[in-house]
Amino acid sequence: MADTGTDAETDVAENDAADIVVDTDSTEDLFCLLDVPILEMPDLAGTTWSFCGGNLGGVQMTQEDYDAALEQYGGKLEIVFSDDGSTVQMVQGGGTLDGVCEYHYEDEGVRLTFDNNGTDLVYACVFADFDGLTMVALSDTSGYNAVYFVQ
């Protein structure tokens, strides 16, 4: 596993990992995706997606929320897919978490599993139209907690 950055960043990632329960079998009834078209998954190989917002507790992030979240991650949070799309990295301001991709074409999504010092950090991702193609990384099945990324 690659360097995970500062202790503060590792603590944030570990706290996030403790709350994650992901079911990638269905994208029905996800709160943050109500009335938002789900799009076909693009070819992810060799792409980089940058943090652009999210939905926390059923409420869309404000600019203040976004700025605070980005600061927690050292000013940078990206999802970088390998050239063949089989592996992925979560790049933070001070370090990187390595992971693998599991594609679910019937649901138009991908499950990303990152190694966080031996603990799995899991996100189920679908693609939606939030004023353009957006990768929605869900940390649970409610849709009340999601992180948004754009290319």
Image (spheres, rainbow, N blue to C red):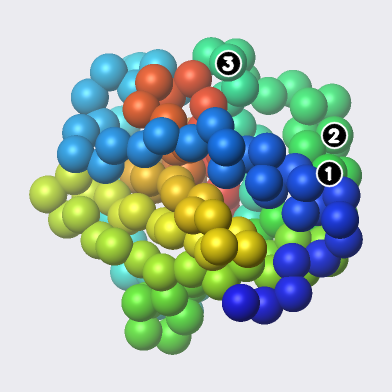
Residue 68's label in the rendered image is 2
Q: Secondary structure at mark 2?
A: helix
Residue 72's label in the rendered image is 1
Cα gap from disc 2 to disc 3, whole angstroms = 16 Å
Instruction: Give the amino acid type for the residue marked by disc 2 in the picture.
Output: Ala
Residue at image location 80% in from the left, 52% down from the top: 9
Residue at image location 19% in from the left, 39% down from the top: 25
In the rendered structure, the answer to whether residue 1 lies left or right of residue 142 reads right
Please state the horizontal and vertical placement of residue 137, each as a whole percent of the image. 47, 43
Q: Quadrant of the N terminus?
A: bottom right
Determine which quarter of the picture holds residue 95.
bottom right
In the rendered structure, the answer to whether residue 64 lies left or right of residue 21 reads right
Instruction: Give the amino acid type for the residue marked by disc 3 in the picture.
Output: Gly
The residue that mark 3 highlights is: 57
Count of residue discs? 3
Please state the horizontal and vertical placement of residue 151, each as a whole percent of the image. 55, 60
